[in-house]
Image (cartoon, helix red, strand yellow):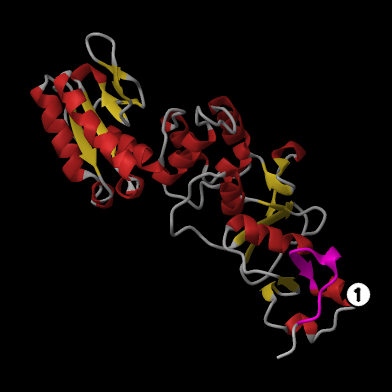
Amino acid sequence: MTRPAPLPHELGEHFRVRDAVALGSSPGRLRRSDLVQTFHGVRSHHPPETVAQAVQAYLPLLPDRGFFSHLTAAALWGLPLPANADPRLHVSYPHGCRPVRRPGVAGHHLVMRADEITVLDGVPVTTAERTWCDLAPWLGFESLVAAGDRAVWRRDPLTTIDGLTDMARRHPDRRHRARRLAALPMICERSDSPPETTLRLRFHRAGLPRPDLNVDVTDAAGRFLGRPDLAFTEFRELVDYEGDGHRTDRHQWWNDVARVPRFEAAGWHTHRATTPDLADGSRRLILAVARSLHDKGWRGDLRL
């Protein structure tokens, strides 16, 4: 088999077929196996493996007034999404424009203000505030709060609670307004991961006291012992979620194991949560935490 002819360097990683033909490439060359048809009328040198790469592949087709929104914008902003989230690219246009219809693309036309669109790494996209609000029809309540937690995360905030609140109140979609407003008071800038958010919300629904998130725990002498995920400080009860990273990172694993005796010696009790504690609605974990809290004087009513 002959080696494919070089393509014009102006085309870049992703390009429209019509542009390649205009620069002298033959239709036969554009059908060679070294190129991938990412979208109808677009060729790429490599298949996209991430949402950001798929967005780059679609950019040659994006009209001047088009922008990325909803789940695609969320992925570009780094907001956490469920594994089963809609994989299509979400491409939007201002209200009055005809939405795009292509395989693998969800087209929208949105009523919005000009300041609700921005440019992120060269890509036109809805702002973080508008993006979070647009997720309400697509995510469950826990996932919506987790996305909000990331948006206001203290280590790398994309916006503020006030910014989300203002956008939620003026968002044109009234159908999901109640869900947005219900999620807002549950958003916390100290949540470091979606599992922490999930556990916090489930503890709240079960009627447990409100835990502190990622606060420093010290002993009687003021020595730092660790920063657990959730701490019922009044009752000296801790909950740590151990995700897959704890299993694959030996150093992280040993650090987590070593600090449990330190907590215990200082009068704290630790519950170690894992993935199954999320899969069963966290009932087993909630009951275990509630028993420990009752033993230490909590007299609240459990709701399960």
Label 1 sits on a secondary structure element that is: helix
Relative image position of residue 65 (x, y in whole percent): 80, 52
Q: Which residue has dot 1 on it?
A: 22
Give the image quarter of residue 216.
Answer: top left
Compared with residue 69, is residue 47 higher up or lower down, i.e. above or below? below
Depth order, front residue of 19/299: 19
User: How many dots with numbers?
Assistant: 1
Residue 19, image x and y in percent? 86, 71
Q: Is residue 44 left or right of residue 222?
A: right
In the drawing, does residue 17 fall left or right of residue 130?
right
Determine if the magenta segment contains residue 249: no
Query: How many residues crowd around disc 1 within 10 Å: few (fewer than 14), some, or many (20 or more)?
Result: few
Residue 35 placement, left or right of 143: right
Name the residue rendered at 23%, 14% in the picture.
219
**Image quadrant of residue 213?**
top left
Q: Position of residue 123 (x, y in %)?
A: 72, 49
Residue positioned most to the left: 295
Residue span colored magenta: 4-16
Q: Indicate yes or no whether the magenta region holds residue 12.
A: yes
Identify the residue at horizontal 8%, vertical 24% (top origin).
Answer: 295
Locate the C terminus by quadrant.
top left
Q: x, y percentage for residue 172?
A: 63, 42
**Residue type, numbered disc 1:** Ala
